[in-house]
Image: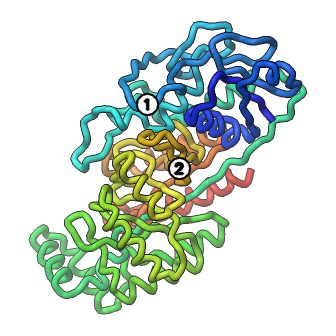
Amino acid sequence: MLLVYTQKVTPRVSFTFKHIFTRILDIQVSFTTKIEEFIAYEGIKLSYTKQVLGNEFFVRSNDFLFHQGIDYVDIQISKWDDVPCFFQMNSTSPIPFDIFAASFYLLSRYEEYLPHVKDEFERFPAEESLAYQNKFLDLPIIDVWAYKLRDLLQEKFPDYKFKERSFKFIPTIDIDIAYKYKYKGFVRMFGGTIRDIIHLNFQDVFERFFVLFKFKKDPFDIYKKLINLQKKFKSETIFFFLLGDYSAFDKNISFNNLKYRMLIKDVADYAKVGLHPSYYSMKNDLKLKKEKKRMENIVNFPITRSRQHYLRMELPETYQNLVDLEITEDYTMGYAQHYGFRAGTCTPFYFYDLDFEIQTPLKVFPFAVMDGTLKEYLKLSTKRSFDAIYKLASEVKKVNGTFITVFHNESVSGSGQWKGWDQKYVEMIEKLTHLEAE
């Protein structure tokens, strides 16, 4: 048990210390505001205040975790050895910055509450983030800091036995469009054919014909293959299904379609599933509630996982709505434009609501990379795309964190513009599950 002395145990302090010590370093932590109790404690201990008290491990505190509300924060980047850091403090502490204030700034997504320029889909863009601007977006920097802190604590308390956590890999699949050609109705089928003819996409015209007349399997129908991959490599794949009403950004087949409902039920029998709330659900609690109810009526059990379509979320409204609807896991935390660690960590954490200054029950699972980011935003080749994935995975492995990828049934199908991605995806599952087993 780690005992922490601080002059005041605020919700921000409790939230941040528990993420770093309990969730990353697997150390139970307790707090005291009584100097006598702290000095008498003979175990591993840390003071988080302005002045060192004795022979404990000391981290000089910034006032950030003792404030409430949202104000402009002046951030200056410095280095801790070769690792970027901020909230630097001049003190006798072995750490040259307030690791806890810096971690809270990233975990709470404090910068997303401040004025910023949104992208075309009303999202907080990676380019606006501190991590992108200072070139540490591709590092799970909080976990890196935590492991460096652990090494210093081990030097200070050599008899303490630290536990080792294990690297974990979670592949996830978003189902934006369940089938490329099937079950879309005559109007959409006819419109799609005319569009392909106008754009001289005759290969798609013929493919549509062969699929609709059952001479060929629909290219996006790769669900059995994915389930078999999960069985073979014992990977814990999570599927997120879009059930919103049809719109310019939500083009899945109807949630009323019997074949689609059967597909969702079949997948849910063999894998974990979640809701993929539609484009316009970002700040619309009624729409979110309706779509969640649709999915629960199909699978006949409560839905507790979610990832926003187009990764559209606005803090804190989107997460507040998820909490109200008893969604307990969200997988939206990442960027569409760039790969990396949006919240600075590869360890799942709880959403801290800055509006109310409380930790909520919503657990946030940050992903590191998405297929569309690599191919459509960054224009990387197939080889360079998967090289980037493995590089990110190696960074997560160094801190034994959780590595989450986002693919779509379209990209994993290997059809059209995604040619070759199907084989590379299988290689990735094999490689990363082996890494998990090491």
Q: Is residue 71 left or right of residue 197?
A: right
- Please say if 193 is above or below 116: below
Q: Residue at x 16, y 84 (%)?
A: 187
Q: Residue furthest bottom?
A: 213
Q: Could you say which disc has been placed on residue 9 in the image? A: none
Residue 60 occupies which quadrant of the picture? Answer: top right
Give the foreground label among 2 and 1.
2
For the residues bearing labels 2 and 1, Cβ distance under 8 angstroms: no
Q: Position of residue 51 (x, y in %)?
A: 67, 10
Q: Is residue 27 visible?
A: yes
Q: Residue at x 52, y 32 (%)?
A: 104
Q: Which residue is mark 1?
A: 131
Q: Is residue 32 left or right of residue 160?
A: left
Q: Amino acid at mark 1?
A: Ala
Between 2 and 180, the residue placed more toward the observer is 2
Q: Which residue is mark 2?
A: 360
Q: Is residue 155 visible?
A: no
Q: Is residue 199 left or right of residue 156?
A: left
Q: Position of residue 52 (x, y in %)?
A: 71, 11
Q: Amino acid at mark 2?
A: Thr
Residue 244 occupies which quadrant of the picture? Answer: bottom left
Q: Position of residue 437 (x, y in %)?
A: 73, 54
Q: Secondary structure at mark 1?
A: helix
Q: Secondary structure at mark 2?
A: strand
